Amino acid sequence: MADIADHAKIDHVIYNEHYNLVPDVAKVAEMLDADPAITHVSMVHSETTSGILNDIEAVGKVVKEKGRVFIVDAMSSFGGVDIPVADWGIDFIISSANKCIQGVPGFSFIIARRSLLMESAGKARSLSLDLYDQWKTMEVDGKWRFTSPTHVVLAFAQAMKEMEAEGGIPARNRRYTENNRLLIEKMNEMGFRTYIDGIHQGPIITTFFYPDECHFTFDQMYRYIKERGYAIYPGKVTEAPTFRIGNIGEIYREDIEKVCGIIKEFLEEYDHEEN
Ligand SMILES: *Cc1c(COP(=O)(O)O)cnc(C)c1O
């Protein structure tokens, strides 16, 4: 977000917490009180870097109390976690076709408070990413301003049908949450601890510490699992050696059991001094 703001030459201040902590609402209130120049607050909901699920409801409440605009990056939560957008005071919520909606990559979308969207006319700092202009064009003839990502739209329509058939967001959230809990349970049994505390752990992606006495590399583990049909991610938090397992997508209990079985075999083969 800071990179985007820098590039677009948007003045900003950053409120950072460690990767394993959620933002403190009191600090957000303090910053807003101290700096009337702050007009917008933008935050991530499901932080894909760590797996934490931030409390956008509590922050949104403060942002609204202080009369600021609230923007939420819900890239990796929208569709997988229920978000009462209006009740939580979210003015702009951003997501894309290819995460919890389970479509293919190719476009993002923003659900916006109409009055604020209209006020943004002519303010975009990018020609192609001009949200107001895109909206206005679609209102006229339903078209993208530039070449439409036709295949992505078709896949998106299909993904929405599949979401509905599954039972909507509550059912998808249940499946993701159950998969995630089972994953953590089985990983714990093998001695892997989670980086994020239980209460803030989201249902989308989980960061695990390597075992204390670790005799393998991420690359060895990645390859072993990949050859057997699954892919995991390297860790991205800077302060601790970790790796991540994501469970967005057509993933079911049997996949979690299988991937944990593969990791167990891997440990039996690799986690010895001689490797
Ligand atoms: C995936 C993701 C992004 C980036 O999405 P792109 O489609 O790669 O642009 C941004 N924020 C969060 C929280 C994400 O999970």
Image: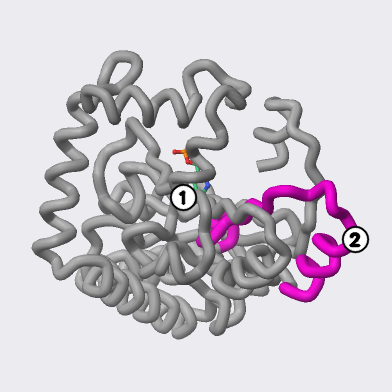
- Classify mark 2: residues with Cα within 10 Å, few (<14), some (14-19) or many (20+): few
Figure quadrant of residue 140: top left
Q: Secondary structure at mark 1?
A: loop
State the residue in front, 158 or 201.
158
Label for residue 71?
A: none
Label for residue 34?
A: 2
Mark toward the start of the polypeptide (2 vs 1): 2
| Disc number lying in front (2 or 1) | 1
Q: Secondary structure at mark 2?
A: helix
**Alpha carbon distance from label 2 to label 1:** 26 Å
State the residue in front, 134 or 204.
134
Q: Circle 1 is placed at which residue position?
A: 113
The residue drawn where x is 46% and y is 50% is 113
- First to last magenta residue range: 25-50
The residue drawn where x is 21% and y is 41% is 156
In the rendered image, residue 154, in percent from the top left (x then y), is placed at 15, 34
- Classify residue 250 as left or right of residue 93: left
- Residue flagged by tag 1: what amino acid is it? Arg
Residue 112 versus residue 186 in the image, above or below: above
